[in-house]
């Protein structure tokens, strides 16, 4: 039966069938052959409804909407200008500024793709014009874009919380310190890599002016994360507030919320959310038949019955996630693997919040892993002269940093969990 699902999944994906429909097709085939023939099809609408009947999922479309508003409003350009004026006098200063801007925009949008597109479209031509090696620039932009799913708010963390029942607020807060460590590590490496380039420092007047212009974008992560951490509002309420503030910034500060841009925002939001929700439904249908066949229970019992260290199983899980990341995108990996991996992690005695951060870092690796790493294609789309080979070579050192962070968090799990005790 396991061979049936694995073989079917691989075959349908190789044939080019979208992930959501691949999962649903396998689930329906499984229902027909293993769970009572056509009568089992009556479960399809019931499971589909239950998959989406989750209050925590209401935050998902709002965070996606917020990222689309900010993508069009011009917040990214102002953040980059502010960062460049504050950091450009350091060795490799514009590289540092670019990663700082990625981190701030990630904390605003929660989207890796939005971060890579917004910052990349502004920073790539500017950095190349100032003499930075293009391969190095592509690498730091691809890696910097991945910060969008680690630094809260984070769409994958919402999916993790929805599938497992863990607190989304705790997941968000747990990502703050690892996100800062990864950002600083990226900055240090990028500065060393481009240390031969140093620009003229900006005046204090220029710094203050750019900060004043970018202050509206800087406010959003403070409102969203600060409100969650202090208990003023829930992650879902924070998403709604973020959307309102984003609309206000676009309409009254940047004054570019015209009808044409509004249509682009809504259409893009609907497309992104539809894709994610279709995958969730497909995964839940597949999860139903896998539960009926007791596949997760069998794998969990087998894993926990082995006379080996839980850390060996943990390493094997990370290797599997890395391999899956080479062929599937982030949301698909989460919804396919979590019904199996989550019970194993609990049975082995690992902290599920800590594991969520480990898993999200693995998903960051997936975003820059060929052949289907999404950020690789985002950067190629920004400038058609960019090659995937060039981007991959530039991003390899940052992938190594991500692996080292996983090792660090494995040795010191408190790095990701010490802030979550008072968060609901």
Image (cartoon, helix red, strand yellow):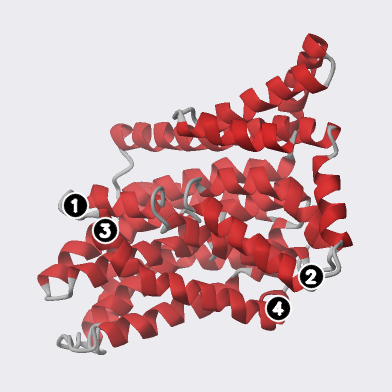
Residue 376 image offset from top left, x and y in percent: 34, 54
Residue name at image x 60 percent, y 78 percent: 407
Q: Give the x, y percent position of residue 67.
A: 44, 50
Residue 84: image location, x then y, percent: 26, 76
The residue tagged 2 is 310
Q: Residue at x 62, y 23 (%)?
A: 25
Residue that appears at 76% across and 67% down: 423
Rounded to the nearest angstrom, the CA distance separating label 4 from label 3 is 35 Å
Give the class, few, some or many, for how many residues have Cα within 10 Å of label 3's Cα (few <14, many ≥20). Answer: few
Of marks 2 and 4, which one's residue comes earlier in the chain? 2
Residue receiving disc 1: 383
Mark 1 and mark 2: span between their CA atoms? 45 Å
Residue ID for mark 4 = 413
| Residue at disc 1, secondary structure | loop
Q: Earlier in the sequence, mark 4 or mark 3?
A: 3
The CA distance from mark 1 to mark 4 is 40 Å
Is disc 2 placed on a helix, strand or loop? helix
Q: From this viewpoint, which residue is outermost toward the top? A: 38
Q: Which residue is mark 3?
A: 389
Q: Are marks 3 and 1 in contact (CB under 8 Å)?
A: no
Q: Quadrant of the C terminus?
A: bottom right
């Amino acid at each position: 039966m396991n061979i049936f699902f694995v073989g079917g999944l691989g075959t349908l994906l190789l044939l080019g069938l979208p992930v959501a429909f691949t999962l649903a097709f396998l689930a329906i085939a499984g229902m027909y052959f293993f769970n009572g023939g056509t009568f089992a099809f009556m479960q399809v609408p019931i499971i589909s409804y239950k998959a989406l009947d989750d209050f925590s999922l209401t935050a998902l479309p709002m965070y996606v909407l917020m990222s689309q508003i900010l993508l069009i409003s011009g917040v990214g350009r102002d953040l980059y200008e502010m960062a460049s004026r504050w950091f450009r006098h350091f060795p490799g200063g514009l590289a540092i500024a670019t990663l700082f801007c990625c981190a701030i925009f990630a904390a605003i949008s929660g989207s890796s793709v939005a971060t890579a597109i917004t910052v990349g479209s502004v920073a790539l031509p500017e950095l190349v014009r100032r003499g930075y090696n293009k391969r190095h620039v592509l690498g730091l932009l691809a890696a910097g874009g991945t910060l969008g799913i680690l630094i809260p708010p984070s769409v994958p963390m919402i999916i993790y919380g929805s599938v497992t029942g863990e607190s989304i607020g705790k997941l968000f807060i747990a990502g703050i310190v690892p996100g800062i460590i990864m950002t600083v590590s990226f900055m240090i490496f990028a500065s060393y890599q481009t240390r031969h380039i140093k620009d003229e420092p900006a005046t204090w007047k220029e710094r203050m002016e750019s900060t004043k212009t970018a202050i509206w974008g800087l406010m959003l992560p403070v409102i969203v994360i600060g409100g969650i951490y202090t208990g003023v509002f829930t992650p879902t309420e924070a998403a709604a507030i973020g959307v309102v503030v984003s609309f206000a910034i676009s309409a009254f500060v940047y004054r570019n919320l015209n009808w044409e841009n509004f249509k682009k925002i809504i259409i893009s939001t609907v497309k992104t959310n539809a894709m994610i929700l279709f995958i969730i439904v497909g995964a839940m249908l597949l999860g139903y038949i896998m539960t009926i066949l007791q596949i997760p229970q069998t794998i969990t019992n087998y894993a926990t019955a082995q006379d080996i260290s839980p850390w060996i199983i943990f390493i094997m899980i990370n290797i599997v996630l890395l391999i899956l990341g080479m062929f599937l995108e982030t949301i698909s990996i989460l919804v396919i693997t979590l019904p199996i991996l989550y019970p194993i992690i609990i049975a082995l005695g690992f902290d599920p919040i800590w594991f969520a951060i480990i898993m999200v870092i693995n998903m960051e690796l997936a975003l820059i892993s060929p052949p289907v790493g999404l950020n690789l294609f985002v950067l190629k789309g920004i400038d058609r002269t960019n090659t995937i080979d060039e981007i991959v070579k530039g991003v390899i050192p940052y992938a190594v940093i991500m692996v080292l962070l996983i090792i660090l968090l494995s040795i010191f799990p408190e790095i990701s969990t010490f802030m979550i005790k008072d968060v609901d």
